[in-house]
Amino acid sequence: MTFFAIILLFYFYCYICLLSILKYVKIINITTSERVCLLLYLILEKLKEVILSVLPITIIVLILHFTITPIDNPALFRFLIGAFIIILGLSIFLFGVDIGVTPIGNLMGNTLAKSNKLWIVAIGGLLLGFFISIAEPDLHILAEQVELVTNNTVSKMGMVLVVSIGIAVLVALGLLRVIFSFPIHIFLLVAYIIILLLGILAPSEFLAMAFDASGATTGAMTVPFLLALNMGVTILKHKKGTSEEDSFGLVGIASAGAIMPVLLLGIIMNPGEITHAPDGGHEISTKILLPFIKNVPHVARDVIIALIPLVVIFFVFQFLSFKLGRKQVGRIIRGLIYTFIGLVLFLTGVNAGFMDVGRLVGEAVAGRSKVIVVIIGLVLGMVTILAEPAVYVLTKQIEDVTSGSIKRRIVLPTLSIGVGLAVALSMVRTLVPSINLWHYLLPGYIIALILTFFVPRIFVGMAFDSGGVASGPMTATFILAFSQGVASHYTGNTMEGFGMIAMVALTPLIVLQVLGLLYKLKLRKSA
């Protein structure tokens, strides 16, 4: 039965690939046999790209299993099945984003900018920012963990609503920034000065939750839409002289919008010392397929909640403004269906196959040398970023906007190094109790903000966008589970695992801007 289901999933994946390239193949004047060979080649190329993104982390876990951290067979088999499902889900999701989510975002951005009325742009940004954020699956995952670990001091729905309101306000301001061509580095400087002041007043526990929220809320659903929305506004303004520098930055601005309200909530609540939930161990299922079956309804519900606001907004705008033809509407609906299927498969594979293994590996590695913990954290961080779905959406847009002058093969390794360093530094913070999260965040953000005055403006937006993109569902599940496993072993309190997502959201801001400096120096040298 399992084998039959896997075969069906593979055939469905091949069908999606065929749909995506069939139009291209038809216009080529070649024989039928040559066309079949070309189809197979393109399918294998697409499959290879996705496999290469998931394979490194799979190999590392297998190496750890056969060397220093043996994993129980049921958990290991679930991990391998999860890797296969993630490969299928990631492929289908990316295809659905291309033909569904991205066109909707572009159309929305164009419509708001075309109105030439600031109040429409502001209200549109507020509504779109709120609904797309409140529907983000990653935010719900983090909010659940916050509610559990804080013994309901901070409720799940309260966390989701507060973060969504903050993002809505900053998205509206971010769109107005594009309309007025306000410098992004000044905008971000003001935003983080406000965050600094709030951070000084807020309880220390809320600092980790706030910065984790900034990464978790810009996940697989939010990032493609915000990138496309920003691009839609920018394209229309570009005709009036706006530079492509404004094509990036909205995701980074939204990340800042997630931090402020959580810090403000901590100041208002002032709960004193939060009573942490006792860590009574983590129950690992001994079944292989049952966790996948149990996860599908829960994940499907979350993804439906994520997509419903987008679908409703699309049809409202279609009736009032877009007036697209039946063929275009059908294509976008198919894209949303593929996005739904791909995201359900991806998140099911991550939740049922990867989270338990992340926790087990973290606890097992923590029982070894502290140096090994830091090294494995570095390696896992470097390879996990390759499997984040939103990373591929961002790097593709970077290549498109810059006409290939800033290539994906340069941006991806840079992000990989940054995220690897982030996880390694998080492990050091867990191992050394005297190191607090703000010891990293304060100098890190000061460096990132200083760099904004020296790098090309396009790299500023790219860097702050990448901070949100890097901390997606793989980070919010596998790496966070690994971090909590290490924290549970050393401190007996999984609350210490919070702050890791904040670090993952920080380091890309620095490494990508350093890449921008090198790019600037190279241009000067060639000139």
Image (spheres, grey):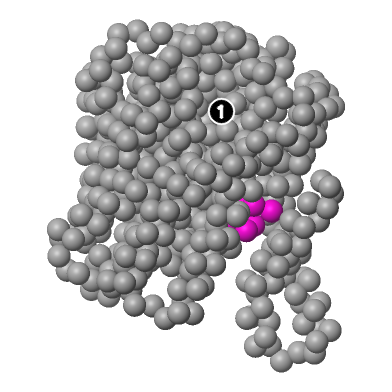
Relative to 326, does residue 151 appear above or below in the rendering? Answer: above
User: Which amino acid type is shown beneath numbered disc 1?
Assistant: Leu
Q: SS for tag 1?
A: helix
Task: From the viewer's side, name the closer residue of 288 and 484.
Answer: 288
* x and y, in percent, of residue 492 in the image: 57, 8
* x and y, in percent, of residue 36 in the image: 80, 79
Q: Which residues are magenta?
A: 88-93
Q: Quadrant of residue 154?
A: top left
Task: From the viewer's side, name the closer residue of 282 and 370.
Answer: 282
Which residue is most to the bottom?
29
Residue 343: say if magenta.
no
Disc 1 designates what residue? 480
Res 401 seen here:
no
Left or right, 87 with reference to 501: right
Left or right, 483 with reference to 454: right
Relative to 142, does residue 38 appear above or below in the rendering? Answer: below
